[in-house]
Amino acid sequence: MQKPRRVLVTGATGTLGSALVAALTNEGCEVVGNYCHDEARALRLQSKTGCHLERGDVSQEAVVESLFSQPFEAVFHLAGYSRDALLPRVSHQEWQDHLKVNLQSAFLVTRASLTCLPRGGKLVLVSSRVGERGFSGQSAYGASKAALLGLMKTAAIEGRPSGIAVNAICPGFAPSEMSKSLSPEILTARSRENWLPE
């Protein structure tokens, strides 16, 4: 019998993360999910999927080192943060928070993945269409996600000799915990960003 594939998912209790954990466990993978907040949601996800969950902030080096003390064959980095504000109203702290959660965590997870994943290992980073094309009110989020794409491109080149594949996906807008505070008008506008031109 083939040994189950071991997979790490950061941001496991978010909307995308919990769906991914469920899909991976359904495929027979042994999943370790990382989360930072929402203990109740984590317990529900663990009960539903049988995954193992570890709490910790992956923008902290010690947390990432602890996670990667165990072997993985694939890593999905979904941990992220977004707080909308027009650029003149973005505080320095909000700017730093976006870079910390969206970029610093991606750097730490990518560095650990290139160091620890075996040949044939996979790393998938989650960026955003906002990082490619911009959107009003999302300067900090967009900048952090655009920088993540630059990180991915370099990591993909550096991982190739070791047989480690590094990729990023750029989802469009999807209703989530992070979008609950948005007005109906903004939600409609964001949804339209997903439409393909005719």
Image: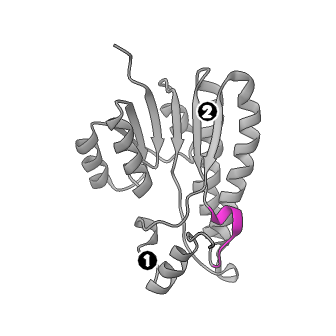
Q: Mark 1 — residue?
A: 181
x 34%, y 44%: residue = 22
Residue 23, how many percent across, how many down? Answer: 37, 42
Residue farthest to the left? 47
Residue 114, how many percent across, how many down? Answer: 65, 30
Q: Tell me which amino acid carries mark 1.
A: Ser
Q: Is residue 142 left or right of residue 183?
A: right
x 41%, y 55%: residue = 14
The magenta span reads 129-136
Residue 183, how many percent across, how many down? Answer: 45, 84
> Does dot 2 land on a helix, a strand or a loop?
helix
Judge whether 60 appears above or below 198 on screen. above
Q: Is residue 6 left or right of residue 190?
A: left
Q: Quadrant of residue 92?
A: bottom right
Mark 1 Cα within 10 Å, few/some/many (few <14, many 20+)? few
x 38%, y 23%: residue = 4
Say which quadrant the C terminus sits in. bottom right
Q: Is residue 173 left or right of residue 16?
A: right
Mark 2 Cα within 10 Å, few/some/many (few <14, many 20+)? some
Residue 173, how many percent across, how many down? Answer: 52, 67
In the rendered structure, find residue 112 and report the number of the disc placed on it: 2
x 63%, y 72%: residue = 197
Judge whether 115 appears above or below 76 on screen. above
Q: How many marks?
A: 2
Tell me which numbered mark, 1 or 2, is placed earlier along the sequence.
2
Q: Nearer the viewer, residue 150 or 24?
A: 24
Judge whether 51 appears above or below 148 on screen. above
